Amino acid sequence: MKMIDFRVRPPLKGFLKMVMYSNSERRDRFTRQLGLSPAPSAQKLSMPLLVEEMKAASVVMGVITGRVSDFLGSVDNEDVAAIVREHPGLFCGIAAVDPTNRRAAIKQIDDAIAGGFRGVNIEPGAYPAPMYADDRRLYPIYAHLEDRDIPTVIMNGGNAGPDLGYTIPIALDRVAGDFPNLRIVVSHGNWPWVTEILHVAFRRPNVYVSPDMYLHELPGMDDYVKAANGFLADRFIYGSAYPLAPLKEYADWFLKLPLRPEAMEKCIYGNAARLLRVNP
Amino acid sequence: MKMIDFRVRPPLKGFLKMVMYSNSERRDRFTRQLGLSPAPSAQKLSMPLLVEEMKAASVVMGVITGRVSDFLGSVDNEDVAAIVREHPGLFCGIAAVDPTNRRAAIKQIDDAIAGGFRGVNIEPGAYPAPMYADDRRLYPIYAHLEDRDIPTVIMNGGNAGPDLGYTIPIALDRVAGDFPNLRIVVSHGNWPWVTEILHVAFRRPNVYVSPDMYLHELPGMDDYVKAANGFLADRFIYGSAYPLAPLKEYADWFLKLPLRPEAMEKCIYGNAARLLRVNP
Amino acid sequence: MKMIDFRVRPPLKGFLKMVMYSNSERRDRFTRQLGLSPAPSAQKLSMPLLVEEMKAASVVMGVITGRVSDFLGSVDNEDVAAIVREHPGLFCGIAAVDPTNRRAAIKQIDDAIAGGFRGVNIEPGAYPAPMYADDRRLYPIYAHLEDRDIPTVIMNGGNAGPDLGYTIPIALDRVAGDFPNLRIVVSHGNWPWVTEILHVAFRRPNVYVSPDMYLHELPGMDDYVKAANGFLADRFIYGSAYPLAPLKEYADWFLKLPLRPEAMEKCIYGNAARLLRVNP
């Protein structure tokens, strides 16, 4: 059995400046609020411990993602690339993009893909100037990504914006409809708009759903699981959002969910491998 | 035991031009995504097979509905009337209305009712110029319908509009509040806004809910069922949305839902019979 | 075992002018729609019977609340204060505030707190001029309340506005984020936006959730309970909304919910006692 964890932030380089590492008290409170226990590797900022925890959890690859944000902290693509390079086979990189200048954004994307990144990360509500997923500034970027068939992560859900309005999935549905060949992974699974995002995914075959930590015993959980076991079996993607959820405890919990064996295999490995074209 | 199926599109006349018949691959994919199997009658475009399937499912009457739409395909009221006429007792007609000219719309309604139609169908988001359920162009029409106590189907839910915003039930709640004596059947059950439409129905005694196919093992299902078993027992209406769901398999599944026997009888027959004043 | 009921309207003084007493038929229909039976004390407008019912339900204190509304009926703070005074230890008062003149509103708040009120009640959608929870007219009031650490009830949910749009929790999330030290009890639990308000409460530690009657066998119930048993255990507050729900039957039902004993104790007593600084 092997798993790909679609959302991992190792205690290295730029990630250490993120609020989830710089404010460990906030992070641990968050973890406990999810009903989970902080990971030793997170508390000790220990990469060797994280590698052990990944092995213990059968996580053969972690997807790590660049970020452009003020309040959450930024992670440069350079840092992500270096971490991937320095841990061969262990991580897979998704590039951040700054949407404020469309030409620079396009170059940033092309450079990242040329440099081995497997996809691009858009976080509308978390940008220094928060925007909605269907903001017109993002449309040239989506067009560029769709034309090159680049997997696109859109963080929509959870704290992904100044208020709950930023994550209402109406904007995301527009993007998915306007770019029908853009493969979109909805990071944080658009929680708490659970029934609504599942409708969007029902309607739009280009939408993948990855609730990551916003699944663990939270309201809406049963509907996510029902969908992952049914129409969404080929487009549900496992992720822990480590260090906010502990890698091992969360994986153990997930593996006990009432999913058909074929659906489980796809959710924890096959769907991400196919989407990112990796085979760890 | 007998059932009225509130949403049936037989393979006849104008219905054959609808996307659900003209694009059979899309339809069957949709059916399978629901976890169901395509009906033989749908695949063979066979009315005799459909009649057999209705009998096998104890469906004594199918409600068939006109439509004005570009992307879904239109069905003229003339076609609906002819199908009802040519299959005595088997079908009951609901008339389409084109809202773009209010005087023509009123005439269309009056002609339809005079011609034996049992209600009127409004599909705001599916009109060639999509609109919201509380669009001002619809208000003279609602007023006319309310004053004549004509049962009104409003398709709100599922793919009923260019994006998910068209089905948010806020607009529908306004209509139900502004026309408190207009009996409204929410076709597609306003899925995926399940908790929200159930609140609207809790609050507005003139709102009936018919999730039709958007019930089958989908997120929100348990809440629909809970409501149908409780406060909504007199206003929940069964429908299959055939040919998107197979008439017989879906009916068999529905009859196994954990509803009290009295609630079940109302949902599959009594509520529709009373609303449409039919007694098949 | 003892309970605090966060939402009680005794059949006394100004409460008798409210629609829930002046229109008993509407009230009883509402109660039955919840699957409950009207309380004898409500039907007989009997305070002695209510006292008996409170004792039978182990409700040692009822929170009673002033209101400024046209369609629901108003209850003056003077009436609330008199009822509290005349039934020592049995009730605890929350003051209404009229937001139309900010200076008068501030004075109203300061007078109420000086007079023994334990908190302030804001009902945005129910005001004679309905507004949203983040209406700018409310912001000076919220600021005043936050600066004085006055517990604030915001009625958001249920029929708390002309349409469902008034209760969408986006506006409430803004308020909770803009006033992070304002302790907010969301009365009616923001039903039907269940998953969404639970996200807001997950994100904002200053938000308390009290679904009161909008919990009883209604859609969303299981998610409220899951949250009350988990991350919301310290911020879920029990209430019946008597006379719309009968005090005793509802309490008996609530006590059977699958909550951990510690969570149950907090929900029915501890959280309200701590928030309002009472110890009945």
Image (spheres, coloured by chain):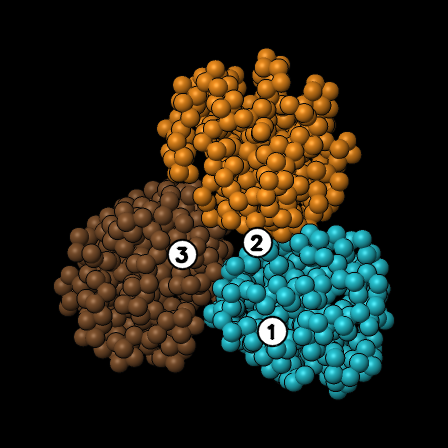
Chain colours: A orange, B cyan, C brown
User: As shown in the figure, which amino acid type bears the numbered disc 1?
Assistant: Ile
Quarter holding the C terminus of chain C is bottom left
- Residue, disc 3: C189
- Residue, disc 1: B268
The chain to which mark 2 is attached is B
The chain to which mark 1 is attached is B
Please name the residue shown 75% across and 58% down the image.
Answer: B38
Residue closest to the eye, A139 or A38: A38
Residue closest to the eye, B3 or B236: B3
How far across and down, in percent of the image, does residue C217 sit? 42, 63
- Residue, disc 2: B219
Label 1 neighbour load within 10 Å: few <14, some 14-19, many 20+:
many
Q: Secondary structure at mark 3?
A: helix
Count of numbered marks: 3
In the rendered structure, which disc, 1 or 2, sits on the residue that comes first in sequence? 2
Please name the residue shown 66% across and 58% down the image.
Answer: B158
How far across and down, in percent of the image, does residue B198 sit? 52, 64
Assess whether mark 1 and mark 3 are in contact (beta carbons under 8 angstroms): no
Q: Nearer the viewer, mark 3 or mark 2?
A: 2
**Disc 3 and disc 1: Cα gap in Å?**
33 Å
